[in-house]
Amino acid sequence: MQKQAVVINSHDNVATVVDDFAAGTLINFFIGGSEQSVKLLQNIPLGHKFAICEIKPQEDILKYGECIGVSTTLIIAGQHVHVHNMESKRGRVNDNHS
């Protein structure tokens, strides 16, 4: 199997794609030694994330075993996970330093 997405930690609920993939593509990835697959529901650009399982509203988004944010809506397996349905738990830098 050619690597299409990366899941580093068995607790992750998102995978990161290694190329641009169109909606409808069946993406294969490994969690530990177990091969799994998810059909993409949306186009996913290179380096972006998609849900590998259902993520409930206000649930942590886990990537590389770390919480990178929280979901703002229900996200189902195969959906793009990005700023439109998650927000960072880390503070944002304000460019106005006056």
Image (spheres, rainbow, N blue to C red):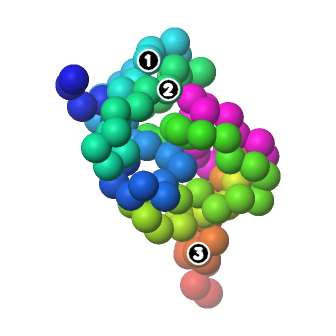
Label 2 or label 3, whichever lies nearer to me, is: 2
Q: Residue at x 53, y 64 (%)?
A: 68
Could you say which is closer to the camera, residue 54 or residue 90? Answer: 54
Q: Residue at x 36, y 27 (%)?
A: 28
The amino acid marked with disc number 3 is: Arg
Label 3 or label 1, whichever lies nearer to me, is: 1
Q: Is residue 46 visible?
A: no
Q: Where the C terminus falls, by quadrant?
A: bottom right
Q: Where the N terminus falls, by quadrant?
A: top left
Q: Is residue 46 magenta?
A: no
What kind of secondary structure does the magenta stretch mostly adopt? Answer: loop
Could you say which is closer to the camera, residue 93 or residue 34? Answer: 34
Magenta-drawn segment: 73-84
Q: Residue at x 50, y 46 (%)?
A: 14
Q: Which residue is mark 3?
A: 90
Label 2: how many Cα within 10 Å (few below 14, some 14–19, many 20+): some
Q: Which residue is mark 2?
A: 38
Q: Is residue 79 magenta?
A: yes
Residue positioned most to the front: 34
* Helix, strand or loop at mark 1: strand
> Residue 7: percent from the left, percent from the top?
37, 47
Residue 2 in which image quadrant: top left
Q: Which residue is mark 1?
A: 26
Q: Are marks 1 and 2 in contact (CB under 8 Å)?
A: yes
Which mark is drawn over residue 66? none
